Image: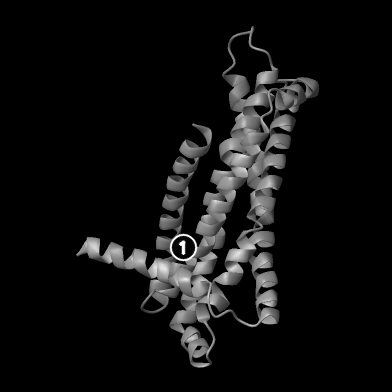
Amino acid sequence: MRIIRYVEDVGSYFYMLKRTFSSFTKGSVLRELIFKEIEDLILGSFYIVAFISFFVGSVVAIQTALNMDNPLIPKTLVGFATRQSVILEFAPTFIAIIMAGKAGSFITSSIGSMRVTEQIDALEVMGVNSLNYLVFPKIVAMLFLPALIAISMFLGIVGGGVASVYGGFATATEYINGVQEDFNTWHLTYAFIKTFIFAFILATVPSWQGYYMKGGALEVGKASTNSFVWTSVLIIASNYVTTQLLLS
């Protein structure tokens, strides 16, 4: 029975995607909805992403420096290791998990509340494709996630530099030289490819959980929890697949 339920869930997810990209709502209405979603999902997450990025970059630099026991190892390694950690994994993947908790839960709870209060049914009665109206603007808004990730990368590297210099682990010149050392532009491309995949997951999985939830206010909370769990699982799984395909 559980297998049948999983198959039904997968089917409902792809059916949702099909309806999302059909019977488009009026362009002027969609444009307003998209701007609102960008403000809520992307701009609304800026401060928490900036705060976490700066201090995690600092921690990565400090931990790297403290584990350099051999005096023959150049101090530029601190900058190099911080850059690699931030660009390859921390900024795209860790921030996506943070977004699953913040933006993903918000998406699920907002759509779930509309389901509970029968607002979605009202949209359907008026002849509006509720999935295109609710989900499509979120997908478009999440396509701006790479801009947030780029800021996260920058602040993570800056945070590592501040911690290195003021902690006495490396000079500013040594840190900057380490950041520039053996830089591979493909790593940035790889990170942003991952980010677009994560953005699609972040927009669609929480929407799917909220749209198809059943019950009352209590179930909205449960749907938000399930949304975070499944979104995180899919982000980690897709991270593994994309890393194998693009870096192996």
Q: Is residue 101 visible?
A: no
- Label 1, on which residue? 205
> In the displayed structure, would residue 163 be above or below residue 191?
above
Left/right placement of residue 119 relative to residue 174 reads left
Please state, as top left, top right, bottom left or bottom right, where the N terminus lies in the image. bottom left
Disc 1 crowd, CA 10 A, few/some/many (<14, 14-19, 20+): many
Residue 218 position within the rendered picture, expressed as x and y whole percent measured from the top left: 39, 74
Name the residue located 53 percent from the left edge and 52 percent from the top edge: 198
Outermost residue to the top: 72
Instruction: State how the image is colored.
Output: one colour
Q: Of 165 and 229, which appears nearest the observer?
A: 229
Q: Is residue 214 above or below residue 69?
A: below
- Rendering coords of residue 148 (x, y %): 67, 52
Residue lying at the far bottom in this picture: please name it: 126
Q: Quadrant of residue 132?
A: bottom right
Examine the image and state in which quarter residue 159 appears. Answer: top right
Nearer to us in this view, 47 or 76: 76
Which SS class for mark 1? Answer: helix
Who's the residue at 45% across and 80% down the image? 115
On the question of residue 172 being in view, the answer is: yes
